[in-house]
């Protein structure tokens, strides 16, 4: 009975991945030439470094803000909590294109923020919020926060609050309880959020392309350029392979420190 | 055991309301230093709410709570210095047993050497030497319970609050732990305020028991006083088993084991009635007979099985008797 499904998975998932792996070593000529380019092509190295830098910063701030939001949510009464959850989920339903262009309109040279600040005389020249790395970061962090909130929320909701009471009863101040008990008990949530946001950020395409204004090139956009414009499929496949193994490598390293099933909410 | 120099807790006219419901209703109670006092009552009787107010997790709606004569109502929970053993223990899952126990000293920033020796002392007190480096989840329920106790006693609190600490243990283990708990109380001399709905726990450990009902105190007394002289139907029924007799417009309690029973015509007693055995339930050491009297009322009678081997069977007509001091007149 499950054979047909296995065939579907093989046909639609495993075959394309294998094909990408294959392309990365045979295009344009057989060998590891595409991978060697990583070491002697300056622009490729720069793109990879930019991608990693942006992803690290995005992940840090998304998880930080996500933690704050999730923490606030679990400490609200049920009605407000549902309202906030709805607000977080609404942003899931709005297309990333819409959200990205909204940022452009808010932060652009003639955007609401620059015009407003100029009108009240705080600044004379518009501030360059977009078409640079700052713009990419603002757009990406904004997009990623809901993804950071959800795993943390699940983690925090499942905490036994009696443990915090015990800490208080034993003489710990609020800060001590947070740092010594609450924070360590939410590490699984922090790890899950971090992995999720980082992996999603790696493949980001629309936001860097629009808010970066072509000046901030990340791997995903570069891959698309290789495929659609310069037709260097081998390089594109090599970068895709690199990302795949980068993600798998990260998961492996994480799994050395904690059970992934626990991080992703599975059984113990 | 010398009497500690602190630990007198007085609860003065304390009331707690949640919206329109009154969880604790004008409770007055003096807990003496070094005493093992149990708040006993069914769920919803207000015993846990009272404990939470003493711990500082709930505010009293009115009334006052004082330790050694000084009001503690305005002292936040973390400054009250009351140890507490929570239902389900609430151990810190990411800390070893040693770090759990040292926690109250760690947050008070005591010197390292003091902490170390104190933790070893505590591990010895609860007989967990050698378990210091384990995580809570690597311990059995009984061991976790002892870690929670050691953690709560580590900073020598004047009062230890225990919220149904044995609820999660199986019956056999519970009886064992009751004895340990009582022994530890006798050694450390701290005031223990123990909340439970289990009458056997209350009877076996307490110096005094407070029976609570609907937010009010029903009766206070030593286990023996409460068992032998219950004042109300509720007290007689909740603590132990009891038959209730209506005699000349008053109600009397009569414990099942205080009734003598013999085959018809054999019994010499002050008061005696005749009845027919309806059912016999076997409990090993005793058997419980349900005897229907001639007036249609049923009495429960406990019979020592060994001393009455094969004496009774269902359907048999028996004489029941008791002495005057076996019955207790109840109020209301």
Image (tube, coloured by chain):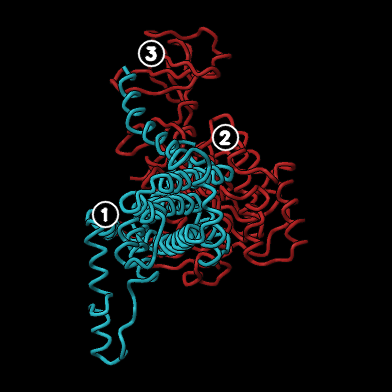
Chain colours: A cyan, B red
Secondary-structure class at tag 1: helix
Which residue, given by chain and number where applicable, does mark 2 sit on?
B174
Q: Chain of mark 3?
A: B
Nearer mark to the viewer, of 3 and 2 = 2
Q: Position of residue A175 (x, y in %)?
A: 52, 67
Please state if B153 lies on the left or on the right of A39 as rendered. Answer: right
**Left or right of B125, for residue B270:** left
Are both tags, 3 and 1, on one chain? no
Q: Real-space Cα distance between discs 1 and 2?
A: 51 Å
Q: Which residue is mark 3?
A: B277
Left or right of B222 in this view: B327: left
Mark drawn on residue A92: 1
Residues at circles 3 and 2 in contact by the CB criterion of under 8 Å: no
A226 to A115, vertically: above or below = above
Which quarter of the rendered picture does the C terminus of chain B lie within?
Answer: top left
Q: Foreground residue, B177 or A93?
A: A93
Task: Compute the Cα span from label 3 to label 1.
Answer: 72 Å
Gap between marks 3 and 2, in whole Å? 34 Å
Where disc 2 sits, the SS reads helix
Residue drawn where x is 42% and y is 17% of the image: B289
Q: Position of residue B141 (x, y in %)?
A: 57, 37
Q: Is residue A237 above or below residue B280?
A: below
> For numbered disc 3, what is the local secondary structure?
strand
The picture places residue B47, in percent across and down from the top left corner, at 43, 51
């Amino acid at each position: 009975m499950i054979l047909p499904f296995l065939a579907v998975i093989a046909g639609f998932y495993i075959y394309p991945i294998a094909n990408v792996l294959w392309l990365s070593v045979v295009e344009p000529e057989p060998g590891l030439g595409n991978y060697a380019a990583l070491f002697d092509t300056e622009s490729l190295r720069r793109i990879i470094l930019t991608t990693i830098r942006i992803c690290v910063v995005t992940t840090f701030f998304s998880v930080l803000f996500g933690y704050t939001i999730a923490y606030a949510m679990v400490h609200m009464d049920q009605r407000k909590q549902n309202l906030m959850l709805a607000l977080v989920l609404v942003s899931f339903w709005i297309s990333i294109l819409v959200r990205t262009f909204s940022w452009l309109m808010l932060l652009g040279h003639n955007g609401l923020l620059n015009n407003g600040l100029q009108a009240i005389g705080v600044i004379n020249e518009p501030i360059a919020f977009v078409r640079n790395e700052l713009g990419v970061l603002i757009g990406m962090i904004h997009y990623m926060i809901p993804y950071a909130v959800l795993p943390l929320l699940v983690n925090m909701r499942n905490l036994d609050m009696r443990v915090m009471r015990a800490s208080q009863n034993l003489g710990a101040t609020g800060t001590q309880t947070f740092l010594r008990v609450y924070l360590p008990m939410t590490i699984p949530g922090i790890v899950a959020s971090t992995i999720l946001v980082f992996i999603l950020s790696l493949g980001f395409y629309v936001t860097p392309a629009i808010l970066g204004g072509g000046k901030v090139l990340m791997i995903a956009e570069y891959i698309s350029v290789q495929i659609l414009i310069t037709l260097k499929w081998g390089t594109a496949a090599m970068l895709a392979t690199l990302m795949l193994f980068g993600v798998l490598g990260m998961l492996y390293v994480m799994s050395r420190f904690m059970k992934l099933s626990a991080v992703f909410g599975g059984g113990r | 055991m010398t009497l500690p120099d602190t630990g007198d807790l007085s609860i003065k006219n304390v009331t707690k309301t949640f919206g329109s419901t009154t969880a604790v209703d004008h409770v007055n109670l003096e807990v003496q230093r070094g005493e093992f006092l149990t708040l006993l009552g069914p769920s919803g009787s207000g015993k846990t709410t009272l404990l939470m107010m003493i711990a500082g997790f709930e505010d009293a709606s009115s009334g006052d709570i004082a330790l050694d004569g000084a009001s503690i109502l305005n002292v936040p929970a973390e400054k009250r210095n009351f140890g507490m053993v929570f239902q389900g223990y609430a151990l810190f899952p990411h800390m070893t047993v040693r770090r759990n126990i040292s926690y109250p000293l760690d947050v008070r920033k005591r010197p390292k050497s003091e902490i170390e020796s104190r933790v070893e002392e505590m591990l010895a007190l609860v007989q967990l030497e050698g378990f210091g480096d384990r995580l809570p989840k690597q311990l059995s329920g009984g061991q976790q319970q002892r870690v929670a106790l050691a953690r709560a006693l580590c900073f020598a609190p004047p009062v230890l609050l225990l919220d149904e600490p044995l609820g999660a243990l199986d019956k056999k283990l519970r009886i064992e732990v009751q004895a340990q708990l009582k022994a530890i109380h006798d050694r450390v001399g701290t005031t223990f305020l123990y909340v439970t709905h289990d009458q056997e726990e209350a009877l076996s450990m307490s110096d005094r028991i407070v029976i609570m009902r609907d937010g009010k105190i029903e009766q206070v007394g030593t286990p023996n006083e409460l068992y032998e002289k219950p004042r109300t139907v509720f007290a007689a029924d909740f603590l132990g088993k009891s038959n209730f007799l209506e005699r000349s417009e008053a109600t009397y309690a009569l414990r099942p084991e205080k009734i003598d029973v013999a085959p018809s015509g054999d019994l010499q007693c002050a008061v005696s009635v005749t009845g027919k055995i309806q059912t016999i339930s076997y409990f090993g050491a005793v058997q419980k007979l349900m005897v229907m009297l001639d007036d249609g009322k049923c009495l429960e009678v406990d019979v020592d099985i060994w001393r009455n081997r094969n004496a009774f069977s269902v359907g048999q007509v028996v004489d029941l008797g008791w002495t005057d001091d076996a019955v207790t007149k109840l109020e209301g």
